[in-house]
Amino acid sequence: MTPPNTLIVGDALQVLKMLPDNFVDVTVTSPPYNKGERDKGWLVDKVVYDTATDRKEEAEYQAEQIAVLNELYRVTKPGGSLFYNHKIRWVRGRLIHPYEWVSKSHWILRQEIIWHRKIAANLRGWRFWQVDERIYWLYKPRYKGDMIGEELNPRHALLTSVWEIPPERDQRHPNPFPIELPTRCIHSVLDGRKGVVLDPYCGIGTTLVAAKLLGCDYLGIDISETYIAIARERLENAEAERPRVLAELALHVVRKTFKERKEQGEWIGRFRPQPVTENEQIPLVKQVTLPMESDE
Ligand SMILES: C[S@@+](CC[C@H](N)C(=O)[O-])C[C@H]1O[C@@H](n2cnc3c(N)ncnc32)[C@H](O)[C@@H]1O
């Protein structure tokens, strides 16, 4: 049995195969996206991992992801959750949706969450600027036929299925999570309980730092020794990141009763647009500039 609070340098699939059944409560992870590092224009060059390649045959990539998802299913306790972050990609004009392979795994798909990153990955006009990624909330049934699981506490459910969280800027890794994201995932399903949190592509350890600050045990795997060393250092200094975790937890509150929301047409009841005052009217032509980042 792997001791709690461990970091492992290795290939996610190979390490997962060595772990026991049914011991993880929540996994939050983001695998490499198989975008190819070198042949998609100057923006993509910035997303090069320390050790791993991000270019495989698509069929091979998807088969490996399904195998990883199924190993994660095996190691998860019945009733446990996996939050799997990925983006929609276009390859030679064909849309590749993560649901293609997520739906072939053993998991029950509980929800597709839109991660609205507020930053465009590519500013060409072939398509509307892509500012979203997806987070699949996947569920392992407690017993045969349990397709739904337990209800979320309303203070979490109120955060809705669109998460507006800007991406992290950290020079030590090309695309780490903002710590608010794993904090939201873990806190929403554990609701203050302690548990074991896993990230098989942990990079510089954001999920693990969130887990530690929430009082959970953690297990992280990454193929890069450099990233694991940074994760270790971050875990030692985790307290420095507590203010951001607390700011995220402060969003998990019920501020208005159901009746008040209904009366005000907020999320429930008939949608009522707020009247626009003369001063707030949008000018006909307005220059809007979104921040830009590398194409992940
Ligand atoms: C999207 S990043 C994850 C970043 C992480 N969420 C964080 O906050 O730092 C994907 C990570 O997968 C790692 N990786 C790539 N191939 C891997 C493999 N076969 N096994 C384990 N880790 C791998 C890369 O080194 C990279 O750190």
Image (cartoon, rainbow, N blue to C red):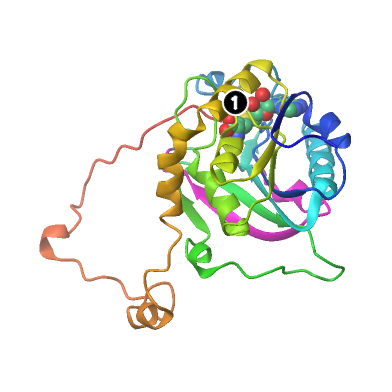
Q: Tell which of 262 and 215 is nearer to you.
A: 215
The residue positioned 77% from the left and 33% from the top of the image is 58
- State yes or no: Cβ of the residue under disc 1 lies below 8 Å from any atom of ligand 1: yes
**Local SS, label 1:** helix
Q: Dividing the image into 4 quarters, which one contains the C terminus? A: top right
> In this figure, which residue is indicated by the disc labeled 1?
231
Q: Which amino acid lies under the numbered mark 1 shown in the image of this protein?
A: Ala
Screen quadrant of the N terminus:
top right
Ligand 1 rendered quadrant: top right
- Report crowding for label 1: few under 14, some 14 to 19, many 20 or more residues within 10 A (C-alpha): many
Boundaries of the magenta span: 94-119
Residue 185 x %, y %: 58, 51
Residue 151, how many percent across, how many down? 63, 70
Image location of residue 209, percent across then percent down = 56, 36
Q: Position of residue 149 (x, y in %)?
A: 72, 68
Horizontal relation, residue 295 to residue 19: left or right: left
> Residue 37, can we see it?
no
Q: Confirm whether the magenta stretch covers residue 178.
A: no
Examine the rendered structure and indicate whether residue 96 appears above or below residue 138. Answer: above
